Image (cartoon, helix red, strand yellow):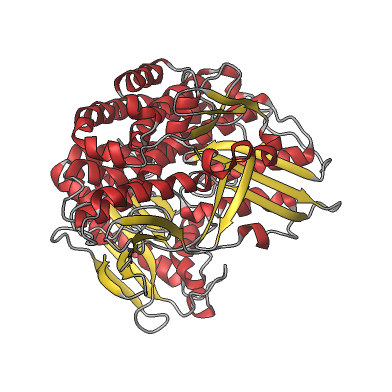
Amino acid sequence: MSQRIMIDPVTRIEGHARITVQLNEAGQVEDAHFHVTQVRGFEKFCEGRPFTEMPSLMARICGICPVSHLIASSKACDALLAVSIPPTAVNLRRLMNLAQIMQSHALSFFYLSAPDLLLGMDADPAVRNIFGILAQHPQMARDGIRLRSIGQQIIELLGGKRIHPAWIVPGGVSEPLTQEKREQMLAMLPEAREITLRALSWFKEILPQYREEIASFANFPSLFMALTNADHELEHYDGTWRIVDSDGRIIADQLDPQHYQEYIEEQTENWTYLKSPFYKPLGKKEGMYRVGPLARLLVSESCGTPEADREREELLATYKDVHTGSFFYHYARLIEILYASERMEMILRDPDILNPRVRAHAAPNRLEGIGVAEAPRGTLIHHYTIDEQGLIRSANLIIATGHNNLAMNRGVLQVAQRFIKNARVTDGALNRLEAVIRAFDPCLSCSTHALGEMPMYVQVLDRAGSVVDERIR
Amino acid sequence: MSVFASGSGRTLIIGIGNPLRGDDGLGWAVAEQLAQDGDMACEIRTVHQLTPELAQWVAFADRVIMIDASCEGVPGELRVYQLALSGHPVSRGTHATTPEELIILAEYLYGRCAPVTIVTMTGADFSIGERLSPTLASKICQIGEVVRQLYTNVT
């Protein structure tokens, strides 16, 4: 008799989801699905609104990465205006995006995933959280809080508030940077770097303990996609897409994000609100790709900053599995935080960053605009069409978490096959099913445009739908 | 490490809530009114919810006053109480930290925690909207006076 295991909801991720695991008649895992179960409808309710409202409206998709939506949305609006925004505005937007990457990655690593890494996948769920870290590793807890706080403070210094700043606007940014704020930001960055290097050092030390997780947490060949700049360095704001495979071969290069519909096909499934994009020329099976910090490190040829480059080189030289294993997303996240602190300092030391010319003004000159940037979790696409009055006719968003959907589903299946024995879900198996998802740091509020919290529910069902085992957390 | 602007004093006032959910925006409305009045040398902040990062602020303040809407009691009912440090926290997640968890975090991580006073008023309507109910809108000045009194008593 076949059975199904359901985990609902998945915890310590951003949004609401559940996992089901289908067992065959012999009690072995046959299939698994990661379901995103809520919808918010941002793409629909913005229809008819003035396009100038879009950055502020779209930022409300998420409280963790609103800056990414501000940037992609404003870039789409820049395209509607048909303006080239001032170079200082580009760098100021970059700065805020990097600060957000710092705070978002810090949240993912220190708050959401460090409890698993520090306390162990089999630790009591009651203590496997930020307070468990506090009790056993107070320095790590202090570091996580401080690092996130630095990213948030930089966002606040630039945009006036930590969440949903309205400073990034169509045509540039609304206010130039002052010398005083620049100095405040520069003063915080050495501490951010010091914390990140300490976390990296610790993570490299404990990583060998997680051989089993490395081997089974979404460890399989796939494509990886990210923006790179003209020198093929790490790029979060502009550039073109490069796609590589797990052997490091370049599958496609210099893809213009403005033509994303030629490369990306969005498929829907009847069991989830999360779309399943894939690289169109290779079809769904071969075209599955991953995005986000690990993809960015694999796709680029260097970071372009000295310390991040050194860490990237060490990662690539030490672990062959890095080209297949999603557990390395944690590692990549730390390297990107390091990169962000270095790159922010470079941008801030450029004298032109204080240039008061930071916004281009224009009326709409095109009826269609596409904006693309790298959000903390990967490539983010905003695509709008407007009417002659500048009112939104249609909006299509492809979010980083959506790009990773096929890989996350396959990762859940891989973990289930490895850790679920005799149709029973132990606490350790339960946590690993969630932890494989956490490695991708999905933001479901963004990707489905969903709202809610995430408890966890696991059911084992037979083929007739009867519950034979159940776990609720 | 200081979160306090120079010359702002070390009293921290935090308005808590979601200003898009009717009376849940009470904490923001009072905090914004106090900031506009500008007659107290203190740091005034507004947040949607308490998060672990706020532990730094709480640790390095001399006094903290949190203003929030409550859904318990009769609409318009005012409560003022001192928060006591006790026990070990149990995390409910990363999106919401309770005031009790926050002071424990501050104490454990930074070895100090300011005295925290909570000022709440029971809301009448938490549905989606940017306006407070008439009951609470008429109480902003009263709550502001309570906060001002608390501030004056310690400075």
Vertical arrangement, residue A212 with respect to residue A35, above or below: above
Q: Quadrant of residue A264?
A: top right
* Closest to the observer, B154 or A386: A386
- At a point 46% along the width and 48% down the height, the residue shown is A64
Q: Give coordinates of residue A165: x percent, y percent.
A: 55, 46
Extreme residue toward the right, this view: A388
Q: Give coordinates of residue A473: x percent, y percent.
A: 26, 65
Residue B96 appears in the figure: yes
* Closest to the observer, A294 or A342: A294
Q: Give coordinates of residue A407: x percent, y percent.
A: 45, 44
* Closest to the observer, A48 or A38: A38
**Left-right relation of B88 to B72:** left
Q: How many marks?
A: 0
* Closest to the observer, A282 or A450: A282
Residue A125 appears in the figure: no
Vertical arrangement, residue A309 with respect to residue A52, above or below: above
**Left-right relation of B84 to A22:** left
- At a point 39% along the width and 21% down the height, the residue shown is A308
- At a point 52% along the width and 48% down the height, the residue shown is A402
Q: Quadrant of residue A33?
A: bottom left
Q: Give coordinates of residue A78: x percent, y percent.
A: 72, 38
Which quadrant would the N terminus of chain A be assigned to in this image? Answer: bottom left
